[in-house]
Image (tube, rainbow, N blue to C red):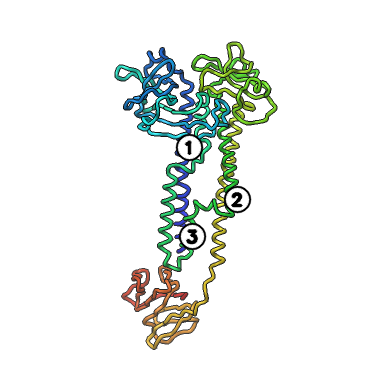
């Protein structure tokens, strides 16, 4: 019976401590993956200028400026050329905190706070002049054109600090550094799991026969804290290091893939170069450069490395200059930097490494938790030496008197007689009183506590804490079959 309760405890711990937080982690990861994909699509759109604003009718544009004013549900954004309204209702609004080091290029320096999704009603708390990126359809409503959301294409609004050049790289690596296990539902899941396991432990606390169940529930209740207890804390340290490395490789994969959103094989593909046109018409491409050329032209390195081979640098070129060292593009969301090799090969390699490191770190974390559970169980087992007690006896009452039943003996009650240790009692058994132990009947087994007493009468079995009803032979006839009572 205790095994069934152990399965219940395991199911509760797995559901609340693993399945629910992991479900929230997958949802969180999906939200930020959709955010990155939407931003990558929008940065390929044309910037909204006055000419495009006059003819816009449902097409998607992007706009970068500063907050001018907020009127009810309308956000006014202005740059040095144009002032446009944006309808906040239905928009997806995010905040990107400032990086620790405000450098417009080196992406692995962006260790600022994690981005946060907010409700559009909170936009009124932002100060005038805050930098904002808006992307989405521009439609005509109430005789004026404005950014507005549709059912299939909601507006994407990003408030950010730092340089404009860092916006694109920080957006496409959003939330890569964090651990998705700790999300909005994790605290509630851990609280609900601890509460349910506490109920199980308190329910069986007063029943000595279920001591193992109580200990198992208490250990399962502490599972969220076990990674920080020795000796499993050593595995936790290795887990954190490997997990951080895996997430860093995720970031590097996104950075290596960033220029490939623009580049397509061009006329210089045979020489290993790529080229394309940015939405504003500027020529954009990638070439292989020696490390000394990168240092001389101060081209930032997206990914740290000490490769002595040629680096792949990408940026803007003048017409006819493909093959030379690139310049910084006018488009602030177009990547400008270098990676140590072919971007496509690097992106695939980094993602495979990230998946392997994340899997290995998860195995180490679970190993540490299992080690701590075994360690706690061993401590409890070593100290589980009950004090010596006098032998317990039970009484068998017959017509000719009572016969004591020492600890550990079995009593077989059959039709018309009782036997114990292969000795038969001649008198017909009318009543048997047994305290504690296991009761084996024709239809199953019932555990008895030391304080409980079983009464065997003419065809029925009862105890002071309830009647066992039809689990045993009918009350209307004498007991038939075999009843075995193991006294403990």
* Alpha carbons under labels 3 and 1: distance apart: 33 Å
Task: Please name the residue shown 56% across and 58% down the image.
Answer: 374
* Alpha carbons under labels 2 and 1: distance apart: 28 Å
Determine crowd level at label 3: few under 14, some 14-19, many 20+ residues with C-alpha closer than 10 A. Answer: some
Task: Please name the residue shown 33% across and 76% down the image.
Answer: 477
Disc 1 secondary structure class:
helix
Contact, mark 3 vs mark 2 (Cβ under 8 Å): no
Residue 408 percent coordinates (x, y): 50, 77
Determine crowd level at label 2: few under 14, some 14-19, many 20+ residues with C-alpha closer than 10 A. Answer: some
The vertical placement of 116 against 269, above or below, is below
Disc 2 secondary structure class:
helix
- Total numbered badges shown on the rendered structure: 3
To which residue does mark 1 refer? 29
Which quarter of the picture shows residue 204?
A: bottom left
Disc 3 secondary structure class:
helix
Residue 46 percent coordinates (x, y): 46, 18
Residue 45 percent coordinates (x, y): 46, 20
Which quarter of the picture shows residue 81?
A: top left
Q: Residue 216 carries which label?
A: 3
Question: Of residues 46 and 461, which is closer to you in this image?
Answer: 46
The vertical placement of 247 against 295, above or below, is below
To which residue does mark 2 refer? 234
Circle nearer the N terminus (3, 1): 1
């Amino acid at each position: 019976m205790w095994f069934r309760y152990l399965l219940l405890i395991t199911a509760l711990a797995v559901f609340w401590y693993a399945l629910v937080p992991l479900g929230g982690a997958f949802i969180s990861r999906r939200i930020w993956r959709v955010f990155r994909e939407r931003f990558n699509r929008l940065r390929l759109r044309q910037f909204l200028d006055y000419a495009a604003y006059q003819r816009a009718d449902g097409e998607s544009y992007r706009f970068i400026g500063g907050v001018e004013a907020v009127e009810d549900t309308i956000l006014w954004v202005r740059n040095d050329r144009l002032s446009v309204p944006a309808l906040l209702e239905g928009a997806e609004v995010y905040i990107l905190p400032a990086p620790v080091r405000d450098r417009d290029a080196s992406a692995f320096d962006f260790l600022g706070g994690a981005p946060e999704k907010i409700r559009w009603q909170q936009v009124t708390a932002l100060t005038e002049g805050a930098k904002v990126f808006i992307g989405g359809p521009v439609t005509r409503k109430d005789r004026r054109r404005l950014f507005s959301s549709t059912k299939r294409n909601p507006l994407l609004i990003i408030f950010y600090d730092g340089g404009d050049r860092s916006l694109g790289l920080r957006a496409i690596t959003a939330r890569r550094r964090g651990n998705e296990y700790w999300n909005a539902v994790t605290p509630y899941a851990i609280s609900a799991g601890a509460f349910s396991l506490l109920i199980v432990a308190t329910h069986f606390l007063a029943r000595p026969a279920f001591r193992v169940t109580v200990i198992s529930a208490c250990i399962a209740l502490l599972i969220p804290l076990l990674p920080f207890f020795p000796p499993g804390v050593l595995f936790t340290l290795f887990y954190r290091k490997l997990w951080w490395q895996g997430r860093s490789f995720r970031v590097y994969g996104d950075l290596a893939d960033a220029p490939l959103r623009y580049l397509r094989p061009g006329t210089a593909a045979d020489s290993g170069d790529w080229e394309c046109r940015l939405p504003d018409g500027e020529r954009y491409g990638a070439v292989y450069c020696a490390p000394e050329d990168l240092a001389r032209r101060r081209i930032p390195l997206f990914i740290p490395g000490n490769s002595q081979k040629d680096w792949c640098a990408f940026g803007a070129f003048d017409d006819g200059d493909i093959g030379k060292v690139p310049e910084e593009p006018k488009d602030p969301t177009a990547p400008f930097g270098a990676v140590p090799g072919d971007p496509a090969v690097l992106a695939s390699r980094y993602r495979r490494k990230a998946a392997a490191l994340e899997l290995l770190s998860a195995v180490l974390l679970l190993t540490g938790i299992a080690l701590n559970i075994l360690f706690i169980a061993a401590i409890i087992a070593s100290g589980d030496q009950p004090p010596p007690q006098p032998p317990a006896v039970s009484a068998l009452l017959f017509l000719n008197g009572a016969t004591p039943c020492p600890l550990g003996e079995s009593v077989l009650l059959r039709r018309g007689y009782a036997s114990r240790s292969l000795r038969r009692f001649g008198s017909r058994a009318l009543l048997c009183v047994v305290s504690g132990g296991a009761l084996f009947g024709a239809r199953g087994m019932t555990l008895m506590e030391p304080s409980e007493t079983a009464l065997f009468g003419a065809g029925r079995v009862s105890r002071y804490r309830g009647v066992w009803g039809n689990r045993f032979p009918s009350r209307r006839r004498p007991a038939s079959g075999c009843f075995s009572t193991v006294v403990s």
